[in-house]
């Protein structure tokens, strides 16, 4: 049978293991790939002697008369469509339904081929027919004779292909060993929100973020880079807060508790994220970087933590006492750790970030001087529906020492309904340069909300929340209260539209501000 007839090819066309940048499965596939990528081979076959094939032929004689008299294949530079070898191979391909890997899965029977190309095609045919022999499928006697002759006539070209394949394997192995593999993926997010409210003109607030994630396979780590640019726009709530000291606005000095979280993003492109994350242990990830924000590592919440998906207000995205606005908005240099305790429902997150780490001024800058934050968070999540986080933050901002304790919780009653909330207590002591006076305040904060998924339309998310960001008698003559309701409608995998209503009373803890409300129509494009 054919398995006995083709021992020569069985030795020269065995599958090749993955050796480098890509798998090289067979002689035929490897050489055809090389030919397809580099174009027609115009070089002439070397005239140097090659050792005769040591592969025994199983059929001692061939009926030469039945095959016709043809020009010796050793005398052919190219194999023409009119040649016997060409027509014989084409007949085998059609009879046994063999594909040679052309993009249209056809054998192009009207083009001449170099001997290299023809040998690659022959190798592919031999390889495809071998399984037929193994399955004891009967082959025509004339096909056996044809294959034996083709193998004998092109033995020299097949040997050359084998040598070239060995060279390719060696070169790709060398490249694999010497390369530095880094793959960068890019993603972007554009938010554009028309908004109007009382005591303010209608505006459009926009922000664009470009994310670059570079993955090093050898180290298992990845570099995160984020660029940000905005329209510099504002909204009705930020207008009221900016008329005063802006203590509790989205860009406030005491707490991020304004209207739209993305107001005031500068029109100049800035670097918002630049950090490297790796896993020294299987259950520990460590991040170090020059631009980091606390909100990216602590105080997460599935229902209130993403201004492009759920709440617009900066207050409902994070606990303003745990995630200090003067550190989070500009970002800074630092480190963060995420430790999953094996076999337990506990996880520990910790970080230290200094906003002015690049400033060498001994009084106002440095890695350990004013405007820094250290935080630790213990998360308990016994099942996917429940998560509770206990938090502590120590910070130094505007010459004031801050110590804050917080609780962050979320519970999904079912796949549609969930509740969430945040609570925090703190102390602010020392001379505060923002207020220009000594401060001994003990503010606390709270927020609660409800989220609904797929109601009434599939793929939607609705949410309602209320809270007070900075409850204290030491700052202002009233207490600011925030409210927001939104409905996120996913139009496609890349586009969502979210109408929202936001309201604030006594903005900046100032009773003169009364009630400020605004309507926003957030549109998010992801790419």
Image (spheres, helix red, strand yellow):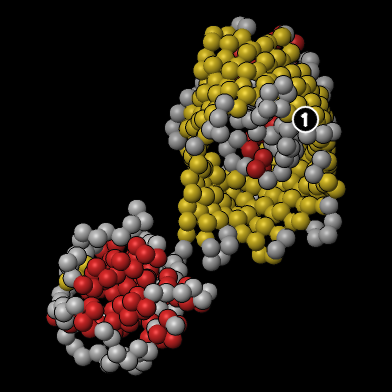
Q: Is residue 220 above or below residue 252?
A: below
Q: Is residue 436 above or below residue 37?
A: above
Residue at position x 40%, y 65% in the image:
96
Q: Which residue is mark 1?
A: 416
The one nearer the camera, 231 or 498, is 498
The one nearer the camera, 211 or 382, is 382
Residue at position x 67%, y 15% in the image:
501
Corner quadrant of residue 44: bottom left
Q: Is residue 130 above or below residue 505?
A: below
Corner quadrant of residue 495: top right
The one nearer the camera, 363 or 462, is 462
Residue at position x 83%, y 46% in the image:
383
- Residue 503, given in percent of the width and then of the height, sits at 70, 14
**Left or right relative to 193: residue 19:** left
For the view shown, which residue lies furthest in the front direction?
Answer: 66
Q: Which class describes the residues within 10 Å of circle 1: few (<14), some (14-19), or many (20+)?
A: few
For the view shown, which residue lies furthest in the top direction?
Answer: 199
**Left or right relative to 436: residue 39:** left
Residue 129 in view of the camera: yes
Residue 398 in view of the camera: no
Q: Is residue 38 above or below residue 288?
A: below
Element type where label 1 sits in the image? loop
**Left or right relative to 491: residue 508:** right
- Residue 164, given in percent of the width and then of the height, sits at 31, 78
- Residue 411, given in percent of the width and then of the height, sits at 83, 36
* Quarter of the image that includes the N terminus: bottom left
Residue at position x 45%, y 69% in the image:
23
The one nearer the camera, 329 or 146, is 146
- Residue 483, given in percent of the width and then of the height, sits at 74, 18
């Amino acid at each position: 049978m054919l398995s006995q007839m083709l021992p020569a090819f069985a030795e020269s066309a065995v599958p090749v293991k993955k050796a480098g940048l890509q798998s090289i499965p067979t002689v035929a596939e490897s050489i055809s790939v090389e030919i397809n990528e580099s174009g027609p081979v115009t070089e002439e076959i070397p005239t140097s002697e090659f050792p005769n094939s040591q592969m025994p032929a199983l059929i001692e004689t061939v009926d030469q008369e039945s095959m016709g008299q043809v020009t010796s294949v050793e005398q052919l530079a190219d194999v023409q469509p009119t040649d016997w070898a060409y027509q014989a191979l084409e007949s085998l391909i059609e009879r046994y339904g063999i594909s040679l890997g052309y993009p249209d899965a056809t054998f192009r029977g009207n083009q001449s081929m170099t001997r290299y190309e023809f040998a690659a095609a022959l190798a592919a045919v031999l390889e495809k027919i071998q399984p037929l022999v193994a399955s004891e499928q009967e082959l025509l006697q004339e096909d056996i004779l044809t294959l034996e002759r083709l193998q004998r006539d092109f033995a020299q070209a097949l040997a050359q292909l084998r040598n070239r394949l060995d060279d390719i394997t060696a070169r790709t192995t060398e490249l694999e060993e010497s390369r530095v593999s880094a793959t960068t993926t890019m993603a972007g997010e554009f938010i554009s929100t028309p908004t109007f409210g009382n005591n303010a003109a209608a505006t459009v607030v926009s922000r664009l973020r470009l994310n670059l994630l570079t993955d090093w396979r050898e180290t298992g780590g990845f570099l995160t880079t984020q660029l940000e640019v905005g329209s510099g726009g504002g909204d009705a709530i930020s207008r009221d807060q900016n008329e005063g000291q802006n203590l509790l606005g989205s860009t406030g000095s005491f707490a991020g508790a304004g209207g739209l979280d993305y107001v005031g993003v500068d029109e100049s492109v800035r670097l918002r994220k630049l950090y490297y994350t790796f896993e020294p242990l299987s259950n520990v990830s460590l991040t170090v970087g020059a631009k980091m924000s606390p909100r990216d590592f602590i105080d997460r919440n599935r229902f209130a933590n993403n201004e492009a998906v759920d709440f617009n207000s900066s207050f409902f995205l994070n606990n303003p006492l745990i995630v200090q606005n003067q550190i989070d908005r500009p970002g800074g240099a630092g480190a963060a750790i995420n430790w999953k305790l094996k076999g337990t429902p506990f996880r520990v997150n910790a970080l230290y970030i200094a906003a002015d780490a690049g400033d060498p001024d001994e009084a106002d800058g440095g890695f350990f001087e004013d405007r820094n934050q250290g935080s630790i968070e213990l998360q308990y999540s016994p099942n996917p529906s429940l998560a509770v986080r206990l938090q502590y933050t120590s910070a130094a901002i505007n010459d004031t020492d801050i110590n804050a304790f917080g609780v962050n919780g979320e519970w999904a009653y079912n796949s549609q309904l969930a509740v969430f909330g945040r609570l925090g207590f703190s102390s602010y002591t020392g001379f505060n340069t923002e207020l220009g006076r000594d401060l001994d305040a003990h503010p606390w904060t709270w927020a609660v909300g409800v989220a609904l998924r797929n109601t009434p339309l599939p793929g939607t998310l609705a949410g309602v929340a209320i809270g007070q960001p900075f409850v204290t008698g030491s700052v202002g003559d009233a207490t600011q209260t925030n409210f927001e309701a939104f409905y996120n409608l996913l139009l496609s995998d890349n586009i969502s539209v979210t109408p929202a209503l936001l309201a604030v009373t006594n903005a900046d803890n100032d009773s003169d501000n009364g009630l400020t409300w605004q309507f926003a129509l957030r549109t998010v494009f992801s790419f």
